[in-house]
Amino acid sequence: MQSRHIQEIQLDPYSQRFARNATNQEKLTHTKQEVVAYTAQLADLKKAADEIAASLEVLREAKAEQDQLVKRREQYDQQIKNSQAQLDQYRGTEIKITTLEKQLTDLTAAQAKLAHQRDAHVQNNLTPLKVRLLARTSVLNDFSSVMADDDWSVIEDQLSHYMHQLTAAKVQYDGIEETINRLSADVGITKQMQTKMGTAIDDRVQGFGSNRVREGLQKDNTSIHEAGAAQMNTQYQPLRDQQAAILAKHPDLKVMLQDATILPQLKAIRKQLKPLVATLRNLLTEIAGNERTQASLRDRIAELKGTIDPDFDAVKLANTIAKLKADRAALKIDPELPQRLAAAIAKQKKFTQQLQAVESEINRRQGIIQTLTVTIETDSAQLHLLATDIVSKLKTLSPYLPDDVHLAKVDELLAFAHSNRSRIRSSNFSDITNQISRLIHRSDGHGEDLNALDVLFADRGFPAEASAMRQQRSVSENGLTIVAFDINEALKLLYDDHAAVEKALAEEKSGNDMAYTTFVQADVAAISAQYQVIETYNQILAEGAGHQHIKLKVELTPINGIAPEAIQEACDAQLQQRPHLEALVKQRLDQLANNTEISNDDEAFFTTAEELLDTREWSDFKVLIRRRQSADDDFEVVDDKFVQSGGSGAEKAQAMVLPLLIVPKMVLQRSNRADAPHLVMFDEFADKLDPETAKSFAKTIVNFGFSFIATMPSGAQNKLLADGVDNIVWDVMGSPQQGDGKFHLNRVQQNFIWKKDD
C-alpha cells in the first residue's frame, strides 16, 4: 500500500517524466546520429556534385565542338543531296527519253499494222457491198444521194436515215391502203343492211293503217343508210390524196411498191454493213489515237531533250559526290554525346536537389536538437528532485521490505512496481492504518490472536516492544504511514531469535538428510533385487517348460506416476548420481508430509506411507505367454481378457500354474540346506484337464525339480499313465467307523507304481 501511495504521488509522475526524458534522450541521440550521417552524406554529395560539374563542363565543350561538326556535316549533306538530285535527274531524264523513244518505235510499228488491217477490211468487206448499193442507184433516184459520200460512216448514217424514212412511208402508205379497202367493204355492207331492213319493215308492218307507217319507216331506212354510205365515200378520196402525197415525197417508194424485193435486200445489206463499219470505225479511231500518241511522245522527247544541259558531265558529278561523301565521313560524330550530356545535367540537377534536401534535413534536426536539449535539461532536474525524495522514502521503508526485496534506487522500485503491479493496484492506501493495526494484532471472535506481533514479542521476552505496539500502532514519517515502534530494533530481535531457531532446525535436518540418503540406498537395493530376480524367474520358466510349445515369461513395469528413468537408475549400480530416483523419493515424501488429512491419524499415516514408499508397489508384475501358433516374440499378457479369449485349456492352465511354481522354487534356491525337500502338493490335480494336458503338467513339475503329491478322484490317475515320470499311486480310504462324532484316521495303501523303463 505504501508502494501504491508512492506510485500515485511520485512514482507515476517520475515514470512518465522518466519515460518521456528517456524517449527524448533516445530521440536526441538518434537525431544527432542523423545529423552526423546527413553531414557525411552532404560531404559526399558535394564531392560528387563537384565531380559531376567538372565532367559536365568537359561534355559541354565536347558538345560545342560536335555541334560545329554537325553543321559541317549538314552542309556536306546538302551539297551531296543537291548534286545527287542533279545526277538522278539527268539519269532519270535519259531513262525517260530512252523509254519514250522505244514506245514511239513500238507505236510506229503498230500504226503500220493498223493501216494494213484498215485497207484489207475495206477491200475485202466493204467494197463488195458498195458495188451492190451503187447498182440500185439506177432505179432509185433518191438513193444516189446516199452513196454520194466516200466516208463509210456517213454512208451508213445516210443509209440508216434513208431506210428509216422509206420504211416509215411504206408503213403509212400501207395503213392508208388498208383503210381504203375497209371503207369499200363497209359501203357494200350498208347497202345490204338497207335492203334487209326494208324487207323486215314490210314483213312486220301489216294491218289497218300500216301503209303510212311502213312508208315512213322505209323512207327513214333509205335516208339513214344512204347518208352513211355517202359519208364513207366522202372519206375515201382524202385517203387517196394522202397516198399520192407520200409517193410524191418519196419517189423511190413507188419503185419499191412495184418491186417488193428491193426493200428487204437493202435491209439485209444495211445489217451486214453496220458491224463492218463499226470495225472500220474502231480501226480508224485506233489509228487516230496512235497518231496522237506518237505526236505526244515526239513532243515529250523534244521537251526532255530541251531540259538537258549539253555541257552536263555525269561522270564528273558522280566523282564530286563520292569526294563529298568521303569528306563527310571523315567528320566523326559521337551519337551518344547528347544523351551523356543530358544524363549529366539530370544527374547534376538531382544532386543539387539532394544537397538542398540534406541541408534542409540538417537544419530541421538541429532545431529539434535545440528543443530536445532544453526539454531534457528541464526533465532531468525534475527527475533528480523526484528521485531524491523517492530514495528518501525508500530508506524510510527499507525495514518493511521483504528479505528478498532490496529497494535502494528508483530503478529498483520501478522494477518492483512493474512485477507487482496487480497487487499494488488492488491495495488501498487509505486503509493502511487499519491494516497495520490488523497485522500487529488480529482479534478473533473472542478478542484473541495467538499469532499477533505484540503477543509474539511478549512471549519471546520483549515486553517493551510489545507495549509500544499496543499503545500506538502507526505514525506519519517522511510523508509515509509507518509503525509506531522501532522497526529496526524489532527486526534485530527477531533475527537473533530466528538464528537460534535455525540452528536447532539445522541439527534436526542433518539427521533427516542422513535418513533420506539411507532410504534412497535401500530403495536402490530393493528395486535392483526385484528386477534382477526377473531374469532368474524367466530362466526357470524356460527350463521348466522347455518341452512345451507354449512359452511363458514374467516382467516388471513401472506403474503410472513412477518415472521409468528412476527404475533404470536404481538398477544401475555404477551410477554415482540418481536424480530421477531422488526426485521420485522426495516427491513422495513431500506428498506424505503435506497430506493434511492424515496428519493427526497415525494409522492412516503409516498406511499411506506404505503405499507411497514401498518399492514393491512401484512396479506391476505381469505374466506373458506365447501361444502355440504365435511368432517367437509375440507374447501377450495373462489377464482376464486372456482367460476369456478362448485359448486352449493347456495354455490357460500353464499360464496360471507355472508362475505359482516359481515361488517355492525361488524359496528353495535360497535354502542353506542341501536336502531341503522339493515337494509340492496339488488338491484335485488334473481336474477338468484332458489326459495330454495332465501329462504335460506332470512333466513340467518334474522339470522344475519338484516331487509332488496330488489328490485325484478314483480312476483319474489314468490321465497320468505313461507320462514318462516315476509315479506311485496310493488309495486313500475312509475309516469304517463313521457317525460317532469322533475323528478317525483314513487308511492309505499303495495301489501300484509305474516309471519309465531304462
Image (cartoon, grey):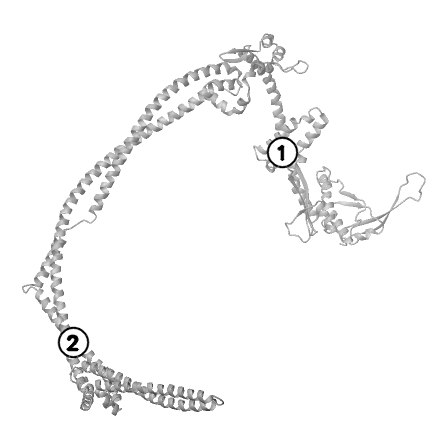
Instruction: Find numbered disc 2 in the image and state the secondary structure of the residue it sits on.
Output: helix
* Amino acid at circle 2: Ala
Q: Quadrant of residue 371?
A: top left
Q: Which quarter of the rendering shows the C terminus? A: bottom right
| Mark 2 neighbour class, 10 Å CA radius: few under 14, some 14 to 19, many 20 or more | few
**Residue 646 position (above or below residue 234):** above
Q: What residue is at 68 percent from the left and 14 percent from the top?
A: 446
Residue tagged by mark 2? 288
Dot placed on the residue nearer the N-terminal end, 2 or 1: 2
2 vs 1, front mark: 2
Q: In which quarter of the image is residue 530?
A: top right
What is the CA distance from the residue labelled 2 to the residue labelled 1?
A: 144 Å
Determine which of the numbered discs, if any, sits on residue 524 in the image.
1
| Mark 1 neighbour class, 10 Å CA radius: few under 14, some 14 to 19, many 20 or more | many
Query: Where residue 440 sits: x, y (%)?
Result: 60, 14
**Residue 592 position (above or below residue 713):** above
Residue 578 seen in the current view: no
Q: Kindly give the residue lying farthest to the right in the view shown.
A: 740
Q: Residue 569 versus residue 358: which sits nearer the camera?
A: 358
Query: Where residue 403 sits: x, y (%)?
Result: 53, 19
Query: Where residue 476 sits: x, y (%)?
Result: 52, 11
Residue 432 seen in the current view: yes
Query: Where residue 171 sits: x, y (%)?
Result: 28, 84
Q: In which quarter of the image is residue 671?
A: top right
* Amino acid at circle 1: Val
Q: Residue 588 versus residue 716: which sits nearer the camera?
A: 588
